[in-house]
Amino acid sequence: MELLIDKNLDNFATICRQAGLKITPQRKLIYRCLLQSKEHPSAEMLLKTVRNHEPSISLDTVSRTLKTFESLGLVKVMAGGGDARRFDGDTSTHQHFRCVNCHKIFDFHYKPYESIEIPSVITDRFKILGVSVYVEGYCPDCQ
Ligand SMILES: [Zn+2]
Ligand SMILES: [Zn+2]
């Protein structure tokens, strides 16, 4: 896990440099907290963790920083939901299970979901940016 985070932080530094974005301790902290989180947190959820390290940080700063990260492709915004926007620091291809009761989001990998064919009723009219598979239900704790 730590190794993966180090690798991501290297990548983070490269992407920021290329985009001309200053790597401030705050930005680094927010990114690191997101990588360490298993929760796919919303900005509010992430703020709690970030404040353990930097109590003076505001929700506005966290939200704005996440938006910047999103535009650089460093984080993914989770599709679907309806509740607050949730963020994923893992930008590799994977799928999600969402518990409808506690709203926890779990990662899983299932190869066949990565090559889903998009029907022509869609491709004829729309420009596709991505496909994500979402499975909903009750997690083990909520059953
Ligand atoms: Zn649950
Ligand atoms: Zn995920």
Image (cartoon, helix red, strand yellow):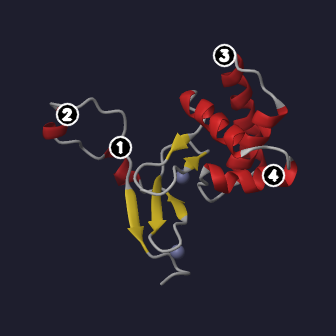
- The kind of residue tagged 4 is Arg
Front tag of 3 and 4? 4
Query: Quick one: label 4 or label 2, which is nearer the N terminus?
Result: 4
Front tag of 4 and 2? 4
What number of labels is visible?
4
Q: Is residue 26 above or below residue 108?
A: above
Query: Quick one: label 3 or label 1, which is nearer the N terminus?
Result: 3
- Where residue 61 sits, quadrant-wise, is top right
Query: Quick one: label 2 or label 3, which is nearer the N terminus?
Result: 3
Which element is circle 1 on?
A: loop
- Residue on which disc 1 sits: 131
Can you tell which mark lies on residue 18? 3
In this view, the residue in front, 61 or 15, is: 61
- Residue on which disc 4 sits: 51
- The kind of residue tagged 1 is Val
- The kind of residue tagged 3 is Gln
State the CA–CA distance, disc 3 to disc 1. 27 Å
